[in-house]
Amino acid sequence: MIERLLTIMARLRDPALGCEWDRAQTFASIAPYTIEEAYEVADACERGDMAELRDELGDLLLQVVFHSRMAEEAGHFAFADVVTSISDKMERRHPHIFGDAANGGDHLWEQIKADERAAKASSGALDGVAIGLPALLRAEKLQKRAARVGFDWPDASGPRAKIDEELSEVARATTHTERAEEIGDLLFAVVNWAKHLGVDAEAALRAGNAKFERRFRTMEALDPAMASRDLDAQEELWRQAKSAEKQDQA
């Protein structure tokens, strides 16, 4: 079946017979769609919508095929090379399944990844952390890399105190540029605190976004004229929405 999709993409990219939009795309122009499709997969997973997940996985697969086709046209690699690369990697990173290692687990996985980075002549502990990652996720990955070489607080009290320090620096900032910089430091510190508490900051914020959206929609349902109410009235609607949600979860 994958051959059908590869054939479709080749036709779409055909210089003479293809689609004008598809022919015009580049790696850079397609990358935002790839990120978007990955998030839509995650959204379908969180909602437990299997029909939607099937469709979104197809959209994400199309992105892989699209990038691979452009790479093949440029003489870099083809879709088959992508499949071979990930297959080799999965076997290499699971020597306890496909090799003779006695035990697996996160420690072995991370050690193998570190060895791979060393083989690529990476010069720094932070090399290979993709710039295109969501900011919270990238912050956590940067912090984990730094922690491997000892640059991290020994426990959660350190990043918690750092949050207070950064809050003070935000308050003391006198320009927009300074405030933006200090809020960036504050968010970075919050991610580090979350890491020490064993909380995935990216997932936690997604859940917080979803909670806010649910409660806000409940406010609108409780009072269709909510937008015209003053803040005190809206706060009361928020409390009602929050109470209703807790009762539903009980």
Image: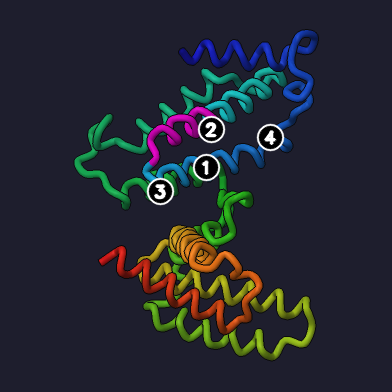
* Residue 40 marker: 1
Q: Can residue 52 be found in the magenta stretch? A: yes
Provide the residue span drawn in magenta. Answer: 49-60
Q: Identify the mark at residue 30; answer none if there is no mark.
A: 4
Residue 77's image quarter? top right
Amino acid type for the residue under numbered disc 4? Ile
Which numbered marker is on residue 250? none
The answer to whether the residues at label 1 and label 2 have Cβ atoms under 8 Å apart is yes
Residue at the image position 49 percent from the left and 80 percent from the top = 236
* Magenta stretch, overall SS: helix
Residue indicated by mark 2: 60
Residue 115: x and y, percent?
A: 43, 45
Disc 2 versus disc 4: distance between alpha carbons?
12 Å
Q: Which mark is residue 46?
A: 3
How crowded pointer 2 is (Cα within 10 Å; few <14, some 14-19, many 20+) is rated as many
Helix, strand or loop for disc 2:
helix
Residue 214, position as x, y percentages in the image = 47, 61
Query: What type is the residue that disc 1 sits on?
Result: Glu
